[in-house]
Image: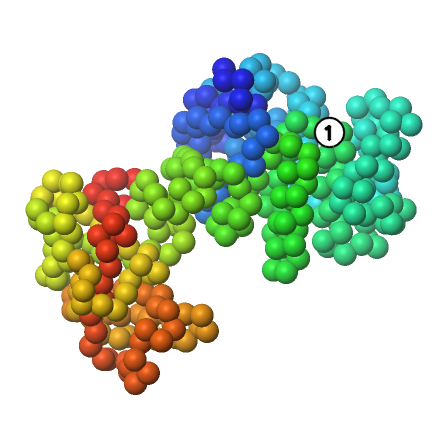
Amino acid sequence: MDQDNLIEMVGVQKSYDGAHLVIPDLNLSIRRGEFLTLLGASGSGKTTTLMMLAGFENPTCGQIMMDGRPIQDVPAHQRGIGMVFQNYALFPHMTVAENLAYPLKMRGNDKTVTKDKVGRALDLVQLSAMAERKPAQLSGGQQQRVALARALVFEPELVLMDEPLGALDKNLREHMQFEIKQIHRQLGVTVVYVTHDQSEALTMSDRVAVFHDGRIEQLAPPAELYDRPSTAYIAAFIGENNGLDGVLTDSSLVLDGGLRVPLPGHGLLPGLRARAMVRPESVRLSKDLSVSVQARVADMAYLGDHTRLVARLDNGNTVVAKLTSGALPEDTSVGAPLVLGWEPEDMLVFPQGAAGF
Ligand SMILES: Nc1ncnc2c1ncn2[C@@H]1O[C@H](COP(=O)(O)OP(=O)(O)O)[C@@H](O)[C@H]1O
Ligand SMILES: [Mg+2]
């Protein structure tokens, strides 16, 4: 066991019905103090993983260790793990202060310690003035801050958050993302955060585990996921990407429909089917790039800081480009011919058969 790891999940499997494994084989180490996000589409196994960490679900197989000790047999309330959910589940008949005192009383803290800790937790989420209110007298954002304070009030080493901001509108959500990050920095607590929102995952996390069909397809810091996706699935899931499918030759990809895209030094076997991927911000209007293709304008949208161009290649593929405003001649119209290009190093090539493609 690596001392830097707070949690280790080894060979964890989960089946709800005894027949189908929703988590086939999960291996995950969570570092002490990190902000780790489980990101994935609905049904990919994020909540199941969190529930097994919390102790509300048992793994069908495998080991979960916290601080080097197996915790499968430790009941949820004895694991010392704080939890925040989307529907905050505050006690409606209790005041904010009473809601925060509850987990402390459960853990046998005396009155003085409880009062002190509740006061500090309220300070942390800037709700000291609301201590005597009932949840119904608070806004959605305030209620979620109480839920956050309640998860932190007993000073757990690990806090699990399952889509905690899902019910909030965009502005409040962004504000709360910032607050949660600040609290994480301030307390140094380990956070495992679940979201299906990739921008939330990228802005908040030290590392992101991308879930796909119950498996972690890639676990990496945000910039690495974006710049060095390990599969075509990740490349398309994180940010936007153009995918061009075809068959490799020594130095090109012959797209379905016959169009040839130069692909110098791709390092894969000729004859393989492959997908080349290039991000919209890497596509430019220039004949002087090593990779260039003939296209026609299919659609354009002026978006202030950039223009979004959808171009159709001769074989029918579309390519989206994010062009700096001014790059397109003003009289450009739908149907106009143009040459699109990009640098070879901005293109990723995935052979068919790699996960997600
Ligand atoms: N209590 C349950 N009983 C049976 N199947 C479940 C249960 N909870 C989740 N599942 C199934 O397990 C899979 C993973 O679900 P879940 O972990 O909730 O995914 P996510 O949180 O990523 O949306 C899904 O196919 C879902 O239908
Ligand atoms: Mg879920």
From the image, tell me which residue sits under label 1. 155
State left or right for residue 114 relative to residue 59. right
Which residue is pictured at 40% across the width and 29% down the height?
Answer: 24
Residue extending furthest toward the front: 288
* Residue 88 point in image, percent of width and height: 71, 45
In what element is the residue under mark 1?
A: loop
* Residue 194 point in image, percent of width and height: 55, 41
Which residue is pictured at 85% across the width and 24% down the height?
Answer: 109
Which residue is pictured at 81% across the width and 37% down the height?
Answer: 120
Which residue is pictured at 49% across the width and 47% down the height?
Answer: 202
Vertical placement of residue 340 versus 252, above or below: below
Within-10-Å neighbours for mark 1: few <14, some 14–19, many 20+: some
State left or right for residue 246 relative to residue 58. left
Residue placed most toward the observer, 96 or 331: 331
* Residue 265 point in image, percent of width and height: 15, 45
Residue placed most toward the observer, 53 or 308: 308
Residue placed most toward the observer, 237 or 290: 290
